[in-house]
Image: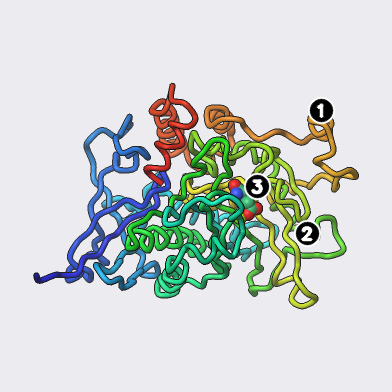
Amino acid sequence: MNREPLVFVGTSDLAGLVRGKGFPAAELPRRMRRGVGLTHSNIMMSAFGPIYETPFGTEGDLVLMPDPTTKVEVGFDDAAERFYLADILTTDGDHWECCPRHFLRRALTALNDLDTQAGLSLLAAFEQEFVYTGVEDRPGATYALDAHRRQGTFGESYMAALRAAGLTPDSFLPEYGARQYEVTIDPTRGLRAADEAVIQREMARAVAHRLGNRAIFAPILDPDGVGNGTHIHFSLRDGADRPVFHDPARPYGLTPIGEHFVAGLLYHLPVLTAITAPSAVSYYRLRPNRWAPTWANIGVQDRGASIRVCPIFGKDGAAQQFNVEFRVADAAASPYLALGALVWAGVDGIRQRRPLPAPPERNFWEMSEAERQAAGVRALPRSLCQALDGLAASEAAREWFGELFFDVYLRFKRAELRAVDGRSETATCARYAEIY
Ligand code: GLU
Ligand code: MG
């Protein structure tokens, strides 16, 4: 049978799913100039498919404009994966105010344009956990060579696909949860870091699909199990591309600029959760004793903290290596929104010169809940509903989004919550696992 290559153009939307449209590859030159048509309500497509509500109705036209730097062309035995990630523009060619990718771009511009220090840029790497369905769940397989072996050719095909897509894989390993694996890619700059996080997920799904299996990135599959985190490692560079995050002589090993940036995250953390852990099941993951955060806290080399100051290995290149990890994200969040929220909060921290609390004198986990609260540490929201109420009350977040996008995001997420209302935790997990 004859075949003609197809290309897909899409964006990681409010549900954190890549949605868009396809066309024959022969049309690519024209599509790179003109884009692909879309309507405003496309952004209101829920995680589960239907548009539950929309302020936009059925009218209006927008443009999905592929960014040539995001090209993915990876050969498989059947159809190749050919896609581009895109910005959502108005028909006049302006960035649409509800475009997730532009939310991040605006945050990065604000970081770059700070009065106190111009030219700052962000370096970030995503560490993503997922469940691979091509292995059986065996007791004792956590981190095991046996679990590494039993995924068969998936891991090697996945690494090859990532590299063919232009990414540099750093690690691939069996994780702590049942059938769970983790993949990390090298750090890269700003917008590209989020593009790569999207491609990293899609390549896992693409390879698993070819093997007749699935890579499931849902935040958690079993309410009593271990969740799938998306951990975001980040640091800052100055205008001359020098690392400006690390000072070994200061608390947490952070320079003043690093301290303010991270303090901004800590300050806004309960609110950020509504953007970075944005599904009903995200909050089943953020529970004690599963290496996922439960408090809006910072810890040095602590995998239970929301913000973890990562170690430096060896004696060389400390400033280059030094980074901080944000652990309150999962794959229900579009990487554009999660990274964008993180940068907006950090920018606010620098603008307001926010300080970090002095490192606690006692081990955080040995303190009672009352002692933690007395020390000014807040618990993370316990549900998406609680997180969204916090977001709705945040004037800062309203400014990051802009009036229309803020309203759209809150409506979108509240409708998602209503769609799973009344289901048991197990049934809700199953619903999300079908999608992500
Ligand atoms: N699975 C944990 C999470 O949900 C993280 C485990 C780890 O530290 O790698 O965030
Ligand atoms: Mg992990």
Callout 1 touching callout 2 (CB < 8 Å): no
Q: Quadrant of residue 83?
A: bottom left
> Colour mode?
rainbow
User: What residue is disc 2 on?
Assistant: 254
Q: Is residue 38 above or below residue 67?
A: above
Q: Which residue is mark 1?
A: 370
The secondary element bearing badge 2 is classed as: loop
Q: Quadrant of residue 312?
A: bottom right
Point out the residue furthest to the left here: 1
Mark 2 or mark 1, which is nearer the start of the sequence?
2
- Ligand 1 within 8 Å, label 3 CB: no
- Amino acid under disc 2: Leu
Amino acid at dot 1: Ala
Q: Earlier in the sequence, mark 2 or mark 3?
A: 2
Residue 344 visible in this rendered orientation of the protein: no
Q: Nearer the viewer, residue 20 or 210?
A: 210
**At x 41% / y 32%, what residue is drawn?**
416
Give the number of the disc on residue 124: none
Q: Is residue 65 left or right of residue 117?
A: left
Instruction: Residue at 39% x, 58% y: name it.
Output: 205
Secondary structure of the residue carrying numbered label 3? helix
Sequence-wise first label, 3 or 1: 3
Mark 3 lies on residue:
348
Q: Quadrant of the N terminus?
A: bottom left
Could you tell me which residue is drawn at 46 percent across and 36 percent down?
429
> In whole angstroms, how far apart are the C-alphas of marks 3 and 1?
29 Å
